[in-house]
Image: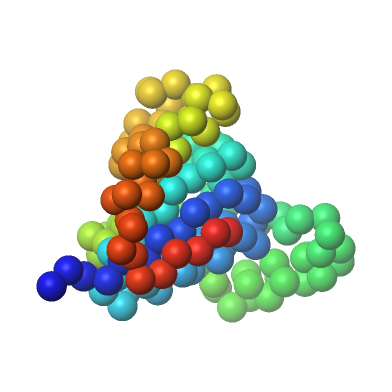
Amino acid sequence: MSRPEFVIFAHSGDYDRLYQVATLAASAAANGDDVHIILFFRALRRFVEDDLDDSAFPAFYGEEGALIGQRMRESRAHSVSELIDTARQLGKLTVYGCAAQVKFMGFTSAEVEGVVDEVISLPNFLKRTADARTKLFI
């Protein structure tokens, strides 16, 4: 019997969404799911540029963004990179870069190496994760 799979299509580079990607990945991994994250556009850029922990909330949050950030710091919430590292340490996380997006964003193979576990075409990723129990687009 195969283990449950949890798939996240990560598109946004906004901090609130990256934080959600990371908390879902760490939680699913802690629950024993194999987690697959495929990165697109700004999410890919934030991973490649090692900019996961810039906790500035999008402008549409207004003053509330700063308050949320302050509350997160006060409660010692884990950072995005810590949560991703936790899922990796559990041996449950695989991070992919969409091959087309790597090209569109102008990244070289050397820039994504060590950041993503594999650069993969979207059709192949969809085949690989076709039976996943959970699939989310963030």
Q: Quadrant of residue 61?
A: bottom right
Residue located 77% across and 65% down the image:
65
What residue is rendered at 35% in x and 71% in y? Answer: 133
Instruction: Tell me how many marks there are.
Output: 0
* Residue sitting nearer the eye, 113 or 74: 113
Rendered position, 61 above or below 121: below
Q: Residue at x 49, y 36 (%)?
A: 48
Q: Is residue 59 left or right of residue 106?
A: right
In-front residue for pair 92/84: 92
Q: Place residue 114 in its image quadrant.
A: top left
Give the x, y percent position of residue 38: 44, 48
Q: Nearer the viewer, residue 68 or 20?
A: 20
Residue that lies at the very extreme toward the right in this rendered image: 62
Is residue 96 visible from the viewing direction of this image? yes
Q: Is 109 left, or right, of 43 in this rendering?
A: left
| Residue drawn at (56%, 26%) of the image | 104
Is residue 131 left or right of 122 when viewed as pictured?
left
Measuring from the top left, give residue 119's x and y in whole percent: 36, 35
Instruction: Give the quarter of the figure containing the N terminus.
Output: bottom left
Image coords of residue 91 (percent x, y): 23, 60
Whether residue 46 is visible, yes or no, is no
Instruction: Locate the C terminus by quadrant.
Output: bottom right
Q: Position of residue 126 (x, y in %)?
A: 38, 50
